[in-house]
Image (cartoon, rainbow, N blue to C red):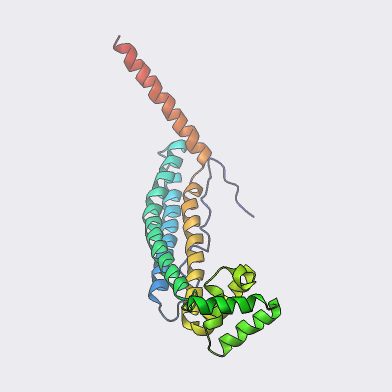
Amino acid sequence: MSTISTPGNFVPPLPSPSISENVFANPAGDPSLTEVQGALAACRSAVENARAGALALLANEMYSTGAKHVAADDFAFKCLRPALAATDRVAQRLAGEIRSLETKTAAPSPPRDVLAAEVRSRLSQMTPGARSKAVATSINDGDDILVAALLSGPAMLSGATQAEVDHAREQWRRARLPDDCRRLDELRKAQVHLQRAGALTLAYQSKCSDPSIIAAAKESQRKADAAVAAANAALMH
């Protein structure tokens, strides 16, 4: 049976299991994946510490209810901020590495303009099925000229759809650069985990306290400060 949180017994929820360095395997010890796992571990530790600290502050009977929640929110922010900053740095480096691999595996070197135009002209006269067969045959034969011509110009020049071009690119890159493609797949999966964990970690701050209680406490403090300021102003006249 779930516990219903009220101002008196508010309990921060357990962090999502997606905030963990164990969400993907890294058997070969890839440096980039190891770095991602380090960032995920930092996020996991941060949310665990934020929850533990919030529980302690919310249980402190020397504070008012409002003060407890404000303190828990501040503590969570201080716990989570360093991990989020580290995650952002890792995410930027990971994105750069993914872009480099995407560029490397994008297409073979383009052929001479005249040859490329001739190949595209021939491709444009084929049916989609014949064009697809010609692409597959050229890749299997180790001949990159046809694919290079197709990928180095607008799809319409070859009579192909963008889906055909994308499929040809994928066929070529996985046939010619399988190791780079496997690593790119791994990095993209790690990127998804990192983005998810980062978003969950950022959102966890608001789960360590009751936002409505914090808003009420801050409004009460604002009114108190305004009253003090008004009283001081009256004394000076």
Identity of the residue drawn at 43% across and 54% down? 52
Give coordinates of residue 108: x percent, y percent.
48, 79
Give coordinates of residue 53: x percent, y percent.
41, 51
Instruction: List the single residue furthest toward the left.
Output: 236
Please tell me which residue lies in front, 86 or 140. Answer: 140
**Left or right: 69, with 82 as reference point:** right
Please tell me which residue lies in front, 135 or 111. Answer: 111
Identity of the residue drawn at 50% across and 69% down? 188
**Left or right: 232, with 4 as reference point:** left
Number of numbered callouts drawn: 0
Q: Quadrant of the N terminus?
A: bottom right
Give coordinates of residue 194: x percent, y percent.
47, 63
Compared with 14, 128 (above or below) is: below
Identity of the residue drawn at 41% across and 42% down? 71
Q: Quadrant of the C terminus?
A: top left
Instruction: List the single residue furthest toward the bottom.
Output: 141
Q: Residue 86 falls in which quadrant of the image?
A: bottom left
Q: In the rendered image, is residue 212 in sight?
A: yes
Identity of the residue drawn at 51% across and 65% down? 192
Please tell me which residue lies in front, 53 or 235. Answer: 235
Q: Residue 74 falls in which quadrant of the image?
A: top left
Instruction: List the single residue furthest toward the top.
Output: 237
Compared with 125, 224 (above or below) is: above
Q: In the rendered image, is residue 170 in sight?
A: no
**Left or right: 141, with 80 as reference point:** right
Give coordinates of residue 209: x percent, y percent.
49, 45
Please tell me which residue lies in front, 100 or 172. Answer: 172
